[in-house]
Amino acid sequence: MWCRNIQLGGKDAIQLEIDVNEAGINAKEAMFIIKDDNTIWVVTYSTGADEYANRLPVFEQSANTIQLNP
């Protein structure tokens, strides 16, 4: 697992990469945690570990389109 501080839609956010190896499932997740005043938004993208590197740019591009409305 790793994490880094980023900006999404002008808001402070954290991007996490999570490895899932449980009950025969080998997956990876890209999780984006976005702070919007007193609200925390969590957006998660998951795929098989073997597809993660190819799909990560799409996950990041999608996360960059998020618009938070009050």
Image: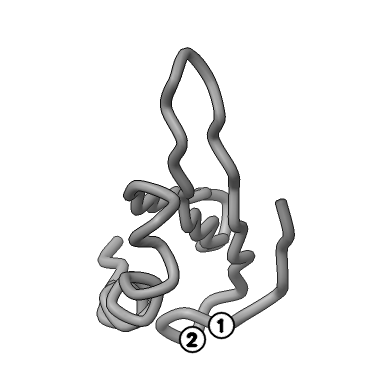
Residue 54, by quadrant, is bottom left
In-front residue for pair 64/25: 25
- Say what amino acid the circle numbered 1 marks: Gln
Q: Residue at x 34, y 53 (%)?
A: 45
Q: Which mark is residue 62?
A: none
Q: Which mark is residue 10?
A: 2
Label 1 crowd (10 A; few <14 / some 14-19 / many >=20): few
Label 2 SS: loop
Q: Residue at x 48, y 48 (%)?
A: 28
Label 1 SS: strand
In-front residue for pair 11/58: 58
- Residue at mark 1 to residue at mark 2: CA–CA distance: 6 Å
Q: How far across and how far down the image is residue 58, in percent?
A: 28, 77
Q: How far across and how far down the image is residue 37, in percent?
A: 56, 61
Q: Residue at x 45, y 48 (%)?
A: 42
Q: How far across and how far down the image is residue 53, in percent?
A: 44, 71
Position of the C terminus, as image quadrant, is bottom left
Marks 1,2: beta carbons within 8 A: yes
Q: How far across and how far down the image is residue 7, in percent?
A: 56, 83
Q: Which mark is residue 7?
A: 1
Label count reads: 2
Q: Is residue 22 above or below residue 8?
A: above
Q: Is residue 7 above or below residue 34?
A: below
Colour logic: one colour
